[in-house]
Amino acid sequence: MDKFVKDLINTYHTRDPFVLAKCLGIHVKFEDLGRLNGYYHEVNGVKVIALNQGLDEHDARFTAAHELGHALLHEGVNVLFLNAYTEYSTGTLEREANVFAAFLLITDEEVEDSKNLSVPQIMEMYGFGEQLVFDRFVSMY
């Protein structure tokens, strides 16, 4: 995942998921999604990331990065459809999108600077859950 994300960042010169989406022709829209943070879907060749308009800036950025992960890693897979209409476990797809988001949003330098901190301290610093911190920070060592 590290090389894939680094190549993406080097190609487009940004880590910002909103800028990357625009560069890749993926539309981002904010709407009332109730309790859902966001989702990615493609209809008639139009790729769209929908984000809940009620998210704060941090959560919107993470959710955009997560959904961008789905767009790039799971092209042609409709996770919402799989969840609603099949018994297919989407856990692996969700984890891959989370790992993509963690590698996109947290630099190697930030990981290196945090190596003497505990997992709870890192979670508080970056606002990510324990699994994301483990996936991103432990992967460096």
Image (spheres, rainbow, N blue to C red):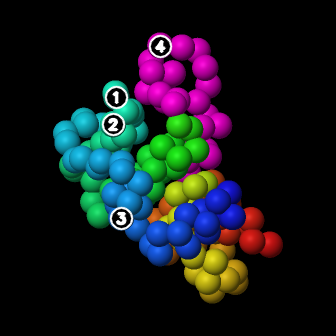
Which residue in the structure is indicated by mark 4? 85
Q: Which residue is mark 2?
A: 46
Q: Position of residue 46 (x, y in %)?
A: 33, 36
* Dot in front, 2 or 4: 2
The reply to whether callout 3 and callout 2 are in contact (CB within 8 Å) is no
Marks 1/2: CA distance?
5 Å
Write the residue at 53% across / 47% down. 72
Would residue 39 be visible to someone looking at this image? Answer: no
| Span highlighted in magenta in the image | 76-98
Tell me, yes or no, whether the two marked residues, 4 and 1, touch with CB atoms within 8 Å: no
Q: Residues within 10 Å of mark 2 (few under 14, many from 20)?
A: few
Q: Earlier in the sequence, mark 2 or mark 4?
A: 2
Cα separation, mark 3 vs mark 1, equals 21 Å
Quick one: label 4, few (<14), some, or many (20+) residues within 10 Å? few
Residue 101 appears in view: yes
From the viewer's perspective, tell me whether residue 118 is left or right of residue 68: right
- Which quarter of the rendered picture does the C terminus lie within? bottom right
| Dominant secondary structure, magenta | helix
Q: Is residue 87 above or below residue 45?
A: above
Position above or below: 73 against 124: above
Q: Secondary structure at mark 3?
A: helix
Kind of residue sitting beneath label 1: Val
Query: Nearer the observer, disc 4 or disc 3?
Result: 3
Identify which residue, 92 or 26, lies in the foreground: 26
Residue bearing mark 1: 43
- Dot 1 falls on a residue whose secondary structure is strand
Disc 3 target residue? 19
Tag shown at residue 33: none
